[in-house]
Image: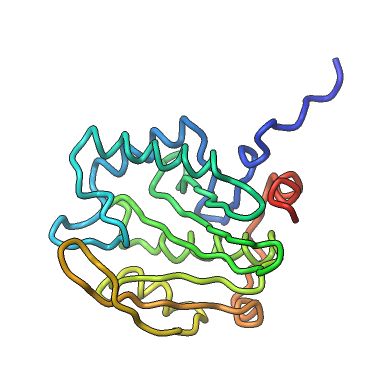
Amino acid sequence: MGPMPAALWPLDELAVSTPRLTLRYVDDGLAEQIAELAAEGIHDPATMPFSEPWTDVAPPQLQWNSLRYFWRCRAETTFESWHLNFAVHEHRNVVGTCTVDGTQFPSIRTAGTGSWLGRRYQGRGLGREMRQAALHLIFAGLDGERATTRAWHDNIASLRVTRSLPYTEDGAGKEPRRDHVDTMLSFSMTRARWEKVHRNDIEISGLGPTREFLGL
């Protein structure tokens, strides 16, 4: 027998590992685990931390919509636009998800991040660790020049993570939030600023095929 062939869908082999967490690209099995974790609860129903209120539906519709989202992101992955979804593992447990988004990335070199943790895994510093893993992928792995992120003005947990890292606050805007308009804050980080917190204990696997697949 010859050597094992490379994965037909190269992103399936993409993973980013820190001493505490591993971010693995979401396949069907991981998508189901994340959907079930979301159904257990992510946030207080009295508030809405997401720009789209996707958690405002009951199971099993919530799980179905989660799976549709992951399938749609995979199906629409091109050089021009991609949403890389990762299952976040702490040891063997899937504790949340992290997304890295790029539009015209080969030329613009800017990517955004978004994430959430299941409620029972919150408040332990995992949010900052997964953000640093995502930033490492953007800058060290994909040669990005700028990373962006957004959060509602009262999303304290997300803002705490963002403000603990060398982002610049770019401004505030008004956007619909459930049945009213509220304030969304935008942040960005340059490569030079990321270099100040660049870690040497984060590893990326499956990077070569991923770069080729994304037009890099």
The residue at the point 23 percent across, 65 percent down is 177
204 with respect to 208 (left or right): left
Q: Residue at x 25, y 41 (%)?
A: 39
Question: Which of the 4 image quarters holds residue 106?
Answer: bottom right
Residue most extreme to the right: 2
Residue 56 picture location, percent across and down: 20, 49
x then y, percent, for residue 19: 56, 56
Q: Quadrant of residue 125?
A: bottom left
Nearer-the-camera pick, 174 or 199: 174
Q: Nearer the viewer, residue 126 or 139?
A: 139
Residue nearest the viewer, comparing 58 with 76: 76
Q: Can you say which quadrant of the picture contains the N terminus? A: top right
Q: Residue at x 63, y 45 (%)?
A: 14
The answer to whether 173 is drawn above or below residue 138 in the figure is: below
* 215 left or right, relative to 77: right
Looking at the rendered structure, the number of numbered marks drawn on it comes to 0
Residue displayed at 63% across by 42% down: 11
User: Quadrant of the image for the C terminus?
Assistant: bottom right
Q: Is 165 above or below relative to 9?
A: below
- How is the structure coloured here? rainbow
Q: Position of residue 215 (x, y in %)?
A: 73, 52
Indicate left or right for 194 with 118 as reference. right
